[in-house]
Amino acid sequence: MPNRGLPSLFLFALAGAAVAQETAGPAPTPASDAHKAPDAKPPTGRLDQNQPLVQLLAESLRRLQTAGHRDDALEVLAELGARERGDDLAALLRRLGASLQIDAATMQAALEAVRDAVAPGNAPTREQVVKWLRDLAVPELRADARAGLLRAWRSALPIAVQTLLQERNAVPMRPAVVGDLEALVHELGARSLHRSRRFDEAMRRASLGTTGGTLIADYSDNRVIQVDRDGKVVWQMNDSYGPFDAELLPDGNLLITEFSAGCVFEVDLEGNRTWMFEGLQAPHHARRLANGNTLIADTQGGRVIEVTPAKAIVWTYDVQIRPFGCERLPDGNTLIADGLKDRVLEVSPAKKVVWEVGAMNLANNVHDAHRLPDGNTLIALWGQGSVIEVDREGKVVWKVTQLRSPSSVQRLPNGHTLVADVTHVHEFDRDGKIVWEMQASGAMQARRY
């Protein structure tokens, strides 16, 4: 919004002209209808924030009285409160409110939206806001951090939202931090409903990285969810058609592979699809690479492709494969889970197969594979109902069996293994014992963050 800083006398001169204009025309509204602005037309569309200040304030007051437009008006008033001199703006609002016969409750909401503005010289820096967010995780610093965020909420809130969405590693999203942020959002809700909703959603998206949170692509229910350690759904996105895979990106967006729709897309905080690659044939898997490109297992298309943000295909491997999973290794090679020949192969950038474990060791539909830090490879065998770990020679060094149809695997930092097994998600310890599980309708992928 443009800066509309104006001298006090000029504000009141404008107010006088505006009041005269607003009150001219029809007779004053009877006292019984004093809660309505005289002859006000039903508001339509978003507020035009480029109109003169007094007209913008008058329209905001009117919209505060109309269901469906309050959030827009409150946001504009809060922005003005942060930019104009708070006392002058409050006085101007009172004068307009009296002229327009705005009811007391609406005036109170408007004044609360503009008051407590932080003077430009006292606004917190980004570094200070990030420090407050970090300090929420430190018991002895938590009270001061909360007080700072509440005191400077109007300036701090946009910085906090941006930090949680775009710089996930800047703030440790441990459960204690998430809990404090939820309480903070509740307090802020009384001051700026629109902004607190945005902050709340930013916090929920950021909390996907909280220790213990598990992200699940649920194909049968057409949704992507996050569950806590108790299996409770704490976040979900329903706008997906047959998701087979979901990856949480560093900026808080999600990369989702839609098997049924034949596409891979990225979705932002607001639910907007910010990037999409279509024309695929039953894709199972996709990963965002460090260079910003996206690696996709185009399963029934018989290829693994690397796609740029501009949707140009810059690398393809399509030599007799039906890829169910793929990942780019640190040395630039690509690991592919091939269900056509029941094998896992490692392919160089020049498309040469440099390692393979094949049908003699594996059987029945290889569905996912991940290279472990020690050089071993973790593999899900869908048709065999098992998960195995093999060394560089293809020898099985660990396994779990008697699963239904495992489709994804992840080795956790504690040495346990997370498995998406359609109707369940399991966590196994090194002895093959289930230490955590939850039921699902159609879990095709699960990942602990």
Image (cartoon, grey):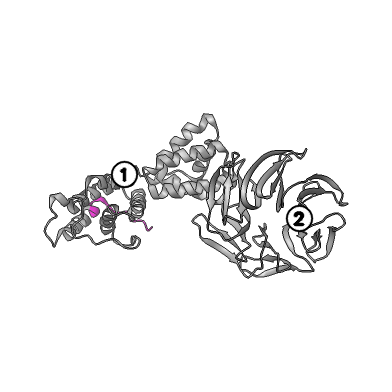
Q: Residue furthest top?
A: 140
Which residue range is magenta in the image? 1-11
Q: Which mark is residue 383?
A: 2
Q: Which quadrant of the figure has residue 414?
A: top right
Q: Secondary structure at mark 1?
A: helix
Residue 237 in view (yes/no) = yes
Q: Amino acid at mark 2?
A: Gly
Find residue 52 and report its horizontal and vertical position in percent: 28, 60
303, above or below 221, in the image: below
Is residue 301 highlighted in magenta? no
Q: Which mark is residue 112?
A: 1
Q: Secondary structure at mark 2?
A: loop
Judging depth in this view, the residue of 351 and 245 nearest the camera is: 245
User: Marks 2 and 1, how far apart in space?
Assistant: 62 Å
Q: Residue at x 49, y 37 (%)?
A: 180
Find residue 279 and report its horizontal and vertical position in percent: 63, 70
Q: Residue at x 72, y 67 (%)?
A: 315
